Amino acid sequence: MNDFRDGVEELIPALRRYARALARDADIADDLVQDTLVRALRSEKLFHGGDLRSWLYTILTNLNRNRRRALARRPPLLPLNDTGADASGTEAEGGDIARALATLVEEQRAVLLLVVLEGLSYREIADIQRVPIGTVMSRLARARAHIRATLAGERPMLKRVK
């Protein structure tokens, strides 16, 4: 194998982690990662150095964005709600956090996950999402405020961000 392929292989666990948190479905996440890897390996000659991780996250983010656009054209499916009556302690708190994350708009959730889950810098996230750093900071602040308000039992304002 060459350095490029070795680097891609090393980043698979991080890609899976990000995709699972972003898609909130293991099967969809696995498909996103697989599609990301296929695109990256087919486009190896287009990668001229730089940060491989950011490049792969950009591919994954764009694939997820395309998937969500396609889903928006379909009629929505109503999920079966789990009452969580037997959940307590840490399990209940984890469920609360998952529900709070689920209520975030896509752009805010993606920024929050890239910062908290993957530890990326604001500059890296701005490059991945092709937005200014100020937009990344704004989305992150709004996401954190939304999560705090949701966990405190307040009704957070849902606002579409730039």
Image (spheres, grey):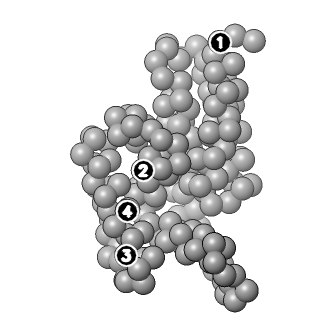
The type of residue carrying mark 1 is Asp
Label of residue 85 in the image: none
Q: Residues within 10 Å of mark 4 (few under 14, many from 20)?
A: some
Nearer the observer, disc 3 or disc 2?
3
Amino acid type of the residue that numbered disc 3 sits on in the rendered structure: Ala
The quadrant in which residue 4 appears is top right
Task: Judge left or right: residue 20 versus residue 102.
Answer: right
**Mark closest to the chain's N terminus, 4 or 3:** 4
Under circle 2, the secondary element is helix
Front label number (4 vs 2)? 4
For numbered disc 3, what is the local secondary structure? helix
Furthest-front residue in this view: 89
Between disc 3 and disc 2, whose residue precedes? 2
SS label for mark 1: helix
- Write the residue at 32% across / 62% down: 142
Give the label, 1 or 3, closer to the camera: 3
Determine crowd level at label 1: few under 14, some 14-19, many 20+ residues with C-alpha closer than 10 A: few
| Residue under pointer 3 | 149
User: Which of the two labelled residues, at mark 1 and mark 3, occupies the earlier sequence position?
Assistant: 1
Q: For the residues marked 4 and 1, what is the alpha-carbon distance in whole angstroms?
A: 37 Å
Residue type highlighted by circle 2: Val
- Up the image or down, 126 lies above or below 162; here it is above
Residue on which disc 2 sits: 111
Q: Residues within 10 Å of mark 3 (few under 14, many from 20)?
A: some
In the rendered structure, which amino acid carries the disc numbered 4? Arg
Mark 4 and mark 2 lie on one chain; the one further toward the N terminus is: 2
Q: Measuring from the top left, give residue 18's x and y in whole percent.
A: 58, 47
- Can the viewer see residue 136 in this picture? yes
Q: Which mark is residue 144?
A: 4
**Residue 140 shown left or right of residue 8 in the figure:** left
